[in-house]
Image (cartoon, rainbow, N blue to C red):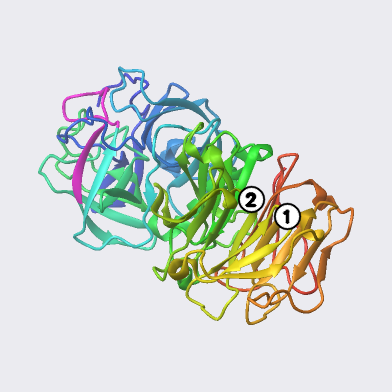
Amino acid sequence: MPVSRTRAAWSAGLLATAVGTGLLTAAPASAVAGPSAKDGSFPFVAKLDIGGERSCSATLVEKQWLVTAASCFADDPAKGFKVAAGAPKLKTTAVIGRADLTRDSGVVADVVELVPREDRDLVMAKLDKPVTGVAPASLGFSAPLAGEELWAAGYGRTKSEWVPDNLHYAKFTAGAVKDTSLGLTGKAEDAVLCKGDTGGPAFREVGGRYELVGVNSTSWQGGCFGNEDETRKGAVEARVDDIAGWVQSVSSRTLLSRSNWKYAAHTASGYFTGDSHDGKRRMDLFVVWQDGEATLFQGADHDDPKQPFSAEYKIADKGSYWRDARAVTGGRFTESGSDGITVRWASGKLSTYTHVDEKGVHDEKTLARSDSWKNARLITAGRFTSNALRDDLLVLWEDGSTSMYSDTDVNGVKKESQLTKADNGWKNAVSIAAGEFTGKKTADLLIRWNDGQAQLFPGVDTAGYHGSRITVRPVGSAWKNTRTLTVGSFTAPGKAPDDLLIGWNDGNVSYYPGIDADGTHGEVQLVG
């Protein structure tokens, strides 16, 4: 092995667990004879330069987070992969979305924090800024099966290049799956993981998207440049699939704080990206910003109460048609198993999008298109009738009157029940939201008034509002400073009572778990 070292090569061989009569040297992910990714394949793979002394590969799993091998940052990888949490000891620069390193595409960012996983060769690396224009890899939650075909990719050596300028990739076959590790064998004779590939991804392809299941840890490196005499070519990956929830928990820490909530215009909650009946995942949050940008925050399936969301997706860019949205609500408008969004536009058009996912809103159904709907000031969807499969729509008009439209999927907005008449105190309402708070047969209505008071109307139905109002916040409370108010299952998936998420005028974000007839029960600050 040559004595000289460059930025793209490890400064020393990384010794790992003894296998048979030999030793595995750390070096995970690029194929010796695999094609280079000049076509822009797998843009989520990153190149790490660690202090100008070491080079590794990594995977973008969230806009501001990479996952890679902890051994990349260890003082002496031959003695183990343990690293301290916090800032890396050596200045570390990541290049993301640049398959050809001789070009200036992609994003360059510094690693500012390490969050190691104690039980395997894996670490989360936080970037100093979010990565835009590159879609993160998805996380696989199911274990690889022995014999399953997987991809591996990285910026390491090939059989003829000491310091390649391109990302390389190849197909591998999964071997033994253990508690924290996974074996890999190249499908082609010369598909091998080499030095510089440590930390790169092993992933499966599912319906045109890629799910990360492993991080390259060690390899025999048979046939790699500088290791031509070695004939063994197997590799070992640190598993990711069994700790995908932990990865989400770590990477979701920066989700909400990246947005300036002073400029949030509308919010809507729902199980947009998955069904609520699995009881595992919390609700998603759809946000429309003043400049027309729209964002979807996917609900998390981990247990960290301060991290209710696991991923962020841009639905629309600044200046989009969402600038014309005047009222937005989420709800179940079909029996498809997922929720949709209803929007009242500035033109007087009322639309329902029955399907929402990380790519946008789909399957628009126009419910109304008239000047009269320009007077619909606030809307909310909830279970106000006996139909448990689809929600109804409650509207607060400019004149203070309120109406309910039962089962808009079937009836549109033709079946109207007037609940309150015009010229009453409802003109002072600034927010309304339906939710399951008191255990009644139908949904409750939460109202925030312009004086800071918030009240619950229990068990609303087509006959109107029943029982005594329940005061959640008194007149003059800090809730006068509320910018957005969203009801949903943000702490206990699919279970009542619902929670309340508030975006404040100062840009902070909080939620109140489990609001019920006794009011709120503590505040969890998410941003601020």
Magenta stretch bounds:
155-172
In the depicted view, which residue is nearer to us: 418 or 177?
Answer: 418
Does 251 lie within the magenta span?
no
Local SS, label 1: loop
Does residue 520 show up?
Answer: no
The image position of residue 406, as x and y in percent, is 54, 71
Q: Name the residue under label 1.
A: 399
Q: Mark 2 points at which residue?
A: 375
The image position of residue 483, as x and y in percent, is 71, 46
Is 338 rendered above or below residue 476?
below
Magenta stretch, main secondary structure class: loop
> Residue at 53% of width from left, 52% of height from top?
343
Earlier in the chain: of badge 2 and badge 1, it is 2
In the depicted view, which residue is nearer to us: 370 or 45?
Answer: 370
Residue closest to the far left:
189
Local SS, label 2: helix
- Three-letter amino acid code at disc 1? Asp
166 sits left or right of 330 in the view: left
> Residue at 75% of width from left, 39% of height from top?
506
- Three-letter amino acid code at disc 2? Asn
Look at the image and tell me in which quarter the N terminus lies: top left
Is 93 rendered above or below residue 412?
above
461 sits left or right of 466 in the view: left
**Dots 2, 1 in contact, CB < 8 A:** yes
Does 164 lie within the magenta span?
yes
> Residue at 32% of width from left, 32% of height from top?
196
Q: How crowded is mark 1: few (under 14 residues within 10 Å), some or many (20 or more)?
A: some
Does residue 285 show up?
Answer: yes
> Residue at 39% of width from left, 46% of height from top?
359
What count of labels does the image hold?
A: 2
The image position of residue 361, as x and y in percent, is 42, 50
